[in-house]
Image: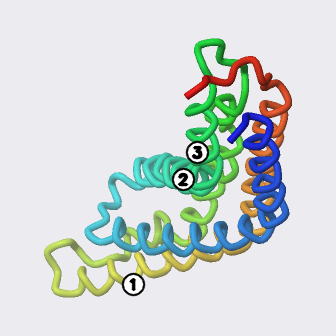
């Protein structure tokens, strides 16, 4: 297959992928939020109130990692495959093509939901100074039930916060997929037949 044919075929695949990307972004945002809610619930098991601030910092960092990994994995399924196909036909004179899609600015991934989002939800749910003063002692039989009740309040507050900004998350994902499409499409335009490696 000639390089021109490969480019045309890839452009058609890329266009279909781009047309589907808005719906994919919404589905991915929903899946991401649901998975993270399950993850936070697990992290709250055995939660220690003395490290409340550290907990918010931790889940913010973990959100960024999960967001980036899942969004990257999504567009790599298509663009990564197309890129490998191109690399099999491009010789030493490697033009600047879709490799750049792997170097996209990921700031929108990590800061789509920043620390203040989780901190606000956490602060609204936590018992506060008076609540802690009135709480049972840790060696009390009532401690486990009281702690579980507080954890549920925090979890529900965090879930509500994430659900309320899910459309924002979907828009950020859509923007990232659009950027990946633009990078790859522009890269294809730079390819020249002279860089084809003869079998």
Residues tagged 3 and 2 counted as in contact (Cβ below 8 A): no
Count up the numbered dots.
3
Q: In the image, what residue occupies the spot 65% across and 12% down?
A: 93
Q: In the image, what residue occupies the spot 22% across and 73% down?
A: 137
Q: Earlier in the sequence, mark 1 or mark 2?
A: 2
Asked whether, in this view, residue 61 is left or right of residue 96, the answer is left
Q: Where residue 14 sits: x, y (%)? A: 77, 52
Q: Where residue 85 sits: x, y (%)? A: 59, 41
Which image quarter is the C terminus in?
top right
The residues tagged by marks 3 and 2 sit, at their Cα atoms, a distance apart of 9 Å
> Observer-nearest residue: 195 or 96?
195
Which image quarter is the N terminus in?
top right
Q: Earlier in the sequence, mark 3 or mark 1?
A: 3
Badge 3 crowding class, 10 Å Cα cut-off, few under 14, some 14 to 19, many 20 or more, is some
Instruction: Determine which of the numbered discs, if any, sits on residue 80 in the image.
Output: 3
The residues tagged by marks 1 and 2 sit, at their Cα atoms, a distance apart of 36 Å
Marks 1 and 2: which is nearer the front? 2
Query: Residue tagged by mark 2?
Result: 73
Figure check: 98 above or below 9? above
């Amino acid at each position: 297959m000639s390089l021109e044919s490969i480019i045309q075929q890839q452009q058609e695949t890329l266009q279909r992928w781009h047309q589907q990307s808005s719906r994919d972004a919404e589905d991915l945002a929903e899946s991401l939020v649901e998975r993270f809610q399950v993850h936070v619930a697990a992290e709250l098991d055995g939660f220690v109130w003395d490290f409340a601030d550290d907990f918010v910092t931790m889940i913010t960092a973990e959100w960024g990692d999960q967001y980036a990994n899942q969004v990257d994995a999504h567009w790599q399924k298509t663009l990564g495959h197309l890129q490998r196909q191109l690399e099999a036909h491009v010789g030493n004179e490697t033009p600047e093509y879709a490799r750049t899609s792997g170097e996209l600015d990921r700031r929108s991934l990590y800061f789509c939901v920043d620390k203040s989002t989780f901190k606000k939800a956490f602060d609204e749910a936590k018992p506060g100074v008076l609540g802690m003063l009135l709480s049972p002692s840790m060696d009390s039989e009532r401690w486990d039930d009281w702690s579980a009740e507080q954890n549920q309040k925090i979890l529900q507050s965090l879930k509500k916060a994430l659900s309320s900004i899910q459309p924002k998350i979907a828009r950020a994902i859509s923007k990232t997929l659009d950027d990946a499409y633009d990078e790859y499409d522009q890269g294809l335009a730079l390819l020249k037949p002279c860089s084809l490696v003869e079998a």
